[in-house]
Amino acid sequence: MGQEIGLMTQAHQRPGPTPSPGPPFLPASAVNGLSVDPVTGAIVLGQNIGQAGDPAQLLSDREIPTMGHILKLLGTGPLIVTQNNRANTGELLQVDNGVVFENGFGGVIALPVGNSQPTMQATANSAMIRGNNASITVGQQDIVFNLSGVGNADFLAFGGVLNMRLAQNGHLLIGSAVDNGLKLQVNGGISQNQAAFLIHAVTALTNGAAASLGTLTNAPAAGDPTKWIPIDDAGVTRFIPAW
């Protein structure tokens, strides 16, 4: 009895080239934050700086729910939030309008120790931190308010009432916006809790002594002063009589 041997052949076809990305990744119609790189043809996040037609433009506002870090950027350049293309000026974060931290539970901007560049800078309007227990924390560096050419730094109380103003000329105004020309101006009472001296003068006070005979006939009470109030006159303790 003969045996028949059958052979099965299978054809292998080499896959053709990968087709170009179709919609919505066409260079002029992405509108979803992605675009086609004009050099490599790869689908990329965003687009080249200044690319004509803005192919990666979003049609409307977007939100990205996440359980981890919202955004982590690795690189040497800054994060620029702007309505128009602008040059890198060296800051880590560049903002052309307002920056608002509105947490409700304590928004914080932390400046790293040894930082030599402003970590946040608002170039057109203002940077705002708003929220319960909002704070600015600096490691071992000074907080610098640069008022050169931009006006005053106002600290507002609840309801938008001016509480304190650091004027551009270096004057500090508390409780008033009217600058009377003095370095420290307070509209209201001042309290101090040091018993040893009422005030300290780092430069010796001018001696106003003259040759006239002084009289005292209108004291608030008869007899000796009830207290001699000490003042520090550049290291010399002097006393002011008081009843």
Image (cartoon, rainbow, N blue to C red):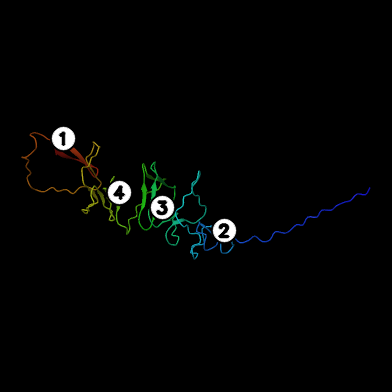
Seen at 38% across and 50% down, the residue is 100
Residue 83, given in percent of the width and then of the height, sits at 42, 60
> How many labels, in total?
4
Q: Amino acid at mark 3?
A: Met
Q: Nearer the viewer, residue 207 or 153?
A: 153
CA distance for labels 3 and 1: 53 Å
Report the residue marked by disc 1: 227
Badge nearest the viewer, 3 or 1 = 3
Reading the chain from its start, which is encountered first: label 3 or label 1? 3
Report the side of 97 relative to 161 (left or right): right
Find numbered disc 3 in the image and state the secondary structure of the residue it sits on.
loop
**Mark carried by residue 37:** none
The 10 Å Cα crowd at callout 3, few under 14, some 14 to 19, many 20 or more, is some
Reading the chain from its start, which is encountered first: label 2 or label 1? 2
Badge nearest the viewer, 2 or 1 = 2
Report the residue marked by disc 2: 43
Report the residue marked by disc 3: 120
Report the residue marked by disc 4: 155
Report the side of 113 relative to 213 (left or right): right
Reading the chain from its start, which is encountered first: label 2 or label 4? 2
CA distance for labels 4 and 1: 39 Å
Reading the chain from its start, which is encountered first: label 4 or label 1? 4
Find numbered disc 4 in the image and state the secondary structure of the residue it sits on.
strand
Q: Amino acid at mark 1?
A: Lys
Task: Tell whether label 4 touches label 2 (CB within 8 Å).
Answer: no
CA distance for labels 4 and 3: 18 Å
Q: Amino acid at mark 4?
A: Phe
Task: Tell whether label 1 touches label 4 (CB within 8 Å).
Answer: no
